[in-house]
């Protein structure tokens, strides 16, 4: 009985030591087994692992992709238009041994502080490089700039055992003190562009109007020419008809022309005409036919229509 009583604590201690020597590595993490601060084992595969109880300890690090938001910084592109840039990065612990040696007991917090400094330096260097303007940063070429930032940051973060997976520029704004001047410059540029467009429009309108005026002149000239041709042909046809009629009966044609002349000469209700008895115009009024129609009219008298 006494031996059994003494054996129970021994068994309990043995079980406790056995349990403390076992640890589980999750698939989302990596683990280091340290002995007096020195790395003895690296556990990157999930599953059961063992360590020496009390003497050794296990330090776990997240193996997932982590996020880091960098503080907003001010950069000056090659066109001297300052910008305030706010970025974030995606990273993971690639080499857990290098990571432990670089940051020690500071862990992820210290690593992120150092990675943030690296990103800020790289962002200033890339966005302030020759040929990189504010328009470049705000255009579709921004994606290429972010790739350059990621590659440079990843190369420097290797000393911390980190792999930089991605870097993105969240916001790119103008400093408050530069907003008014920048807006004024942008407004002036837009007004200049508008003035140029208006001038080009006026020039095009002048060309269209000149072409239209020339077309009108050509059409009117052509129409007048055709009308003169038609009028001349009509006059020729009329004269031909008159000539044919005159040739068929000269006396009647002469009488008809005299009647037409009387009609044109005696217009209105109170028209008068003074003629001499021997006038050719009086021929049909003073002849035999005329006397039968108007016997009361004599030479030198006024005739009314």
Image (cartoon, rainbow, N blue to C red):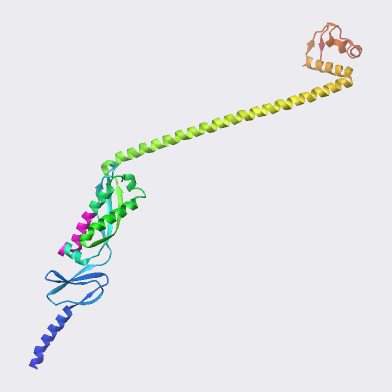
Q: Tell me: residue 29, above or below residue 254.
A: below
Q: Quadrant of residue 242?
A: top right
> How many tags in the picture?
0
Front residue of 262 and 187? 187
Q: Position of residue 127 (x, y in %)?
A: 28, 48
Front residue of 146 and 231? 146
Quarter holding the N terminus is bottom left
Residue, far left: 2
Q: Is residue 249 at least partly visible in the picture?
A: yes
Q: Tell me: residue 300, above or below residue 72.
A: above
| Residue 105 within the magenta-colored segment of the rendering | yes
Residue at x 18%, y 64% (from the top left corner): 107
Residue at x 64%, y 27% (from the top left corner): 221
Q: Tell me: residue 272, above or below residue 242.
A: above
* Magenta portion: prevailing SS class: helix
Q: Quadrant of residue 191?
A: top left
Q: Is residue 169 at least partly visible in the picture?
A: no
Q: Quadrant of residue 5?
A: bottom left
Q: Position of residue 244 (x, y in %)?
A: 85, 23
Q: In the rendered structure, which segment of residues is drawn in magenta? A: 103-118
Quarter holding the C terminus is top right
| Residue 12 within the magenta-colored segment of the rendering | no
Residue at x 70%, y 28% (from the top left corner): 226
Left or right: 173 in relation to 59: right
Q: Position of residue 2 (x, y in %)?
A: 7, 92
Q: Tell me: residue 124, above or below residue 221.
A: below
Front residue of 77 and 108? 77
Left or right: 113 in relation to 293: left
Q: Position of residue 40 (x, y in %)?
A: 16, 72
């Amino acid at each position: 009985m006494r031996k059994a009583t003494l054996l129970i604590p021994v068994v309990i201690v043995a079980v406790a030591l056995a349990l403390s020597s076992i640890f589980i590595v999750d698939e989302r993490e990596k683990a280091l087994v340290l002995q007096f601060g020195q790395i003895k084992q690296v556990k990157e595969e999930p599953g059961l692992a063992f360590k020496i109880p009390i003497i050794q300890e296990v330090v776990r690090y997240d193996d997932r992709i982590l996020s880091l938001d960098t503080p907003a910084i001010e950069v000056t592109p090659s066109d001297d238009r300052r910008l305030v840039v706010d970025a974030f990065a995606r990273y993971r612990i690639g080499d857990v041994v290098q990571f432990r040696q670089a940051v020690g007991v500071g862990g992820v917090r210290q690593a992120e502080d150092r990675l943030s400094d690296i990103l800020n330096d790289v962002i200033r260097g890339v966005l302030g490089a020759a040929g990189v303007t504010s328009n470049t940063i705000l255009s579709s070429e921004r994606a290429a700039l972010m790739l350059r930032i990621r590659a440079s940051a990843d190369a420097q973060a290797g000393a911390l055992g980190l792999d930089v997976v991605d870097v993105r520029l969240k916001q790119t704004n103008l400093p408050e003190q530069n907003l008014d001047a920048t807006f004024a410059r942008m407004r002036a540029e837009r007004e200049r562009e508008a003035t140029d467009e208006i001038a080009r429009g006026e020039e095009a309108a002048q060309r269209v109007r000149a072409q239209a005026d020339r077309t009108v002149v050509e059409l009117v000239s052509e129409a007048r020419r055709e009308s003169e041709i038609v009028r001349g042909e009509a006059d020729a046809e009329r004269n031909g008809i008159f000539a044919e009629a005159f040739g068929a009966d000269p006396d009647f044609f002469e009488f008809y022309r005299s009647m037409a002349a009387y009609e044109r000469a005696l217009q209105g209700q109170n028209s008068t005409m003074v003629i001499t008895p021997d006038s050719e115009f009086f021929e049909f009024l003073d002849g035999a036919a005329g006397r039968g129609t108007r016997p009361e009219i004599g030479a030198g008298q006024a005739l009314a229509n």
